[in-house]
Amino acid sequence: MISRQIDTRRTFRPLPISILINTANTFHCDIRIECAGGDVDAKNYDEVLRNLKPCSPFLLFYFNGNDEQAAQKTFERIFQN
């Protein structure tokens, strides 16, 4: 399992949740996002829409599975552009 805190302010524009969910669904590993005292399954649209309430510009991502390193690098990259 990899955990990585990602600064969401590094992107020049707000990232649509559809990009977040579609990116998560390209990987076979579990991807969770910790925010506001709970965690959210990044692959579940309803859960992300309902429960992703960032209380700071940093989100803590958890990657667990076969391609966790590739997922971690991709998520860091999408928040840099």
Image: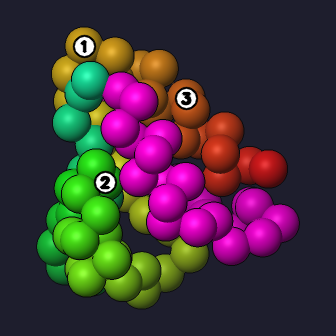
Helix, strand or loop under label 2: loop
Q: From what the image shows, is residue 44 above or below residue 23?
A: below
> Where in the figure is residue 11, as x and y percent of width and height?
75, 61
Q: Is residue 47 left or right of residue 3?
A: left
Q: Is residue 76 left or right of residue 13?
A: left
- Whether the residues at callouts 2 and 3 have beta carbons within 8 Å, the answer is no
Provide the residue designation for mark 1: 66
Q: How dense is the environment of label 2, judged by Cα within 10 Å: few (below 14), some, or many (20 and up)? A: many
Q: Disc 2 or disc 3, which is closer to the eye?
A: 2
Q: From what the image shows, is residue 70 above or below residue 51?
A: above
Q: Residue at x 25, y 82 (%)?
A: 50
**Residues at marks 1 and 2, CA–CA distance in whole angstroms:** 16 Å
Q: Earlier in the sequence, mark 1 or mark 3?
A: 1
Provide the residue designation for mark 3: 73
- Whether the residues at callouts 1 and 3 have beta carbons within 8 Å, the answer is no
Q: Is residue 12 magenta?
A: yes
> Where in the figure is residue 79, as x and y percent of width and height?
65, 52
Q: Amino acid at mark 3?
A: Lys
Provide the residue designation for mark 2: 42
Q: Residue at x 25, y 27 (%)?
A: 29
Foreground pick, 21 / 7: 21
Q: Amino acid at mark 2?
A: Ala
Helix, strand or loop under label 3: helix
Q: How dense is the environment of label 1, judged by Cα within 10 Å: few (below 14), some, or many (20 and up)? A: few
For the magenta stretch, what is the residue range? 2-27
Q: On the image, which quarter does residue 51 sit in?
A: bottom left
